[in-house]
Image (cartoon, rainbow, N blue to C red):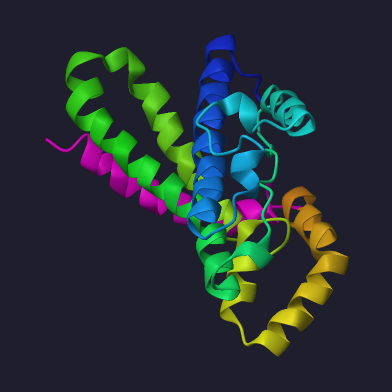
């Protein structure tokens, strides 16, 4: 039975969730607009308002799971029309990777805020920013997994030769969701498969950023 979180911890995770999700989806929408597709803009998704990106079911799932000691969530997918892109394959890659890059950049910016603003003058906010850093790293590495509906599937597909990419897309369209659910839900040694895959990367990069944040 997982340890129950306190109200303060839940609030911290919700804030981190909103920051990471908003940055991620905004980056997708902004990249699509730069590539020539204004679909997301017309639907109000080129926005830093978290409410524009929240998926009701994904948000409820996050609150429910975080109250039980872990968090699973998702936002509304950014609508993209690849036929409007100037260079469809290259632009698909850029739009797909934009969310990951935005989360990584946000983690670095928050690390510098932690070092130069929060740590010396407002230590009570240190835990909040640390959580945001790790949440952004988690979103970045999670979305790099090459299984739909995650961004990594389109990143990989756009880099492969066209014939191989089409075969991969066909297979993943049929089995991708089941593969992802298996990775998330099947436990090995008390941790999900996806946890074993992601945690080394998250902890390594996060540890380096924390050393930077608290370096003497």
Image quadrant assignment for residue 91: bottom right
Q: Nearer the viewer, residue 42 or 102?
A: 42
Residue, x 60% and y 38% (percent of image)? 45
Residue, x 18% and y 28% (percent of image)? 116
Q: Quadrant of the N terminus?
A: top right
From where the camera sits, is residue 79 visible? yes
Q: Nearer the viewer, residue 117 or 21?
A: 21
Residue, x 33% and y 22% (percent of image)? 126
Q: Main secondary structure of the magenta part?
A: helix
In the rendered view, tell whether residue 27 sits above or below residue 188. Answer: above
Find residue 125 and report its horizontal and vertical position in percent: 34, 17
Find residue 170 and report its horizontal and vertical position in percent: 82, 75
Q: Which residues are magenta?
A: 187-216
Image quadrant assignment for residue 77: top right
From where the camera sits, is residue 139 visible? no
In the rendered view, tell whether residue 201 sits above or below residue 42. Answer: below
Q: Is residue 215 magenta?
A: yes
């Amino acid at each position: 039975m997982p340890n129950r979180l306190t109200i303060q911890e839940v609030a911290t995770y919700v804030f981190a969730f909103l920051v990471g999700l908003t940055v991620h989806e905004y980056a997708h929408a902004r990249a699509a607009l730069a590539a020539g597709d204004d679909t997301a803009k017309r639907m109000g998704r080129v926005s830093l308002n978290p409410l524009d990106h929240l998926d009701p079911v994904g948000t409820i799932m996050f609150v429910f799971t975080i109250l039980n000691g872990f968090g699973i969530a998702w936002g509304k997918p950014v609508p993209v029309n690849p036929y409007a892109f100037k260079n469809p394959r290259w632009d698909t890659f850029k739009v797909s990777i934009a969310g990951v890059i935005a989360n990584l950049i946000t983690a670095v910016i928050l690390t510098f805020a932690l070092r130069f603003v929060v740590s010396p003058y407002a230590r009570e906010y240190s835990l909040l920013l640390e959580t945001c850093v790790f949440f952004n790293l988690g979103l970045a590495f999670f979305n790099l997994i090459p299984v739909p509906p995650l961004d990594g599937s389109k990143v990989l597909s756009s880099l492969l030769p066209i014939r191989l990419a089409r075969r991969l897309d066909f297979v993943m369209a049929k089995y991708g969701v089941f593969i992802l659910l298996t990775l998330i839900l099947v436990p090995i040694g008390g941790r999900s498969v996806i946890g074993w895959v992601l945690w080394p990367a998250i902890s390594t990069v996060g540890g380096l950023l924390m050393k930077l944040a608290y370096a003497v």
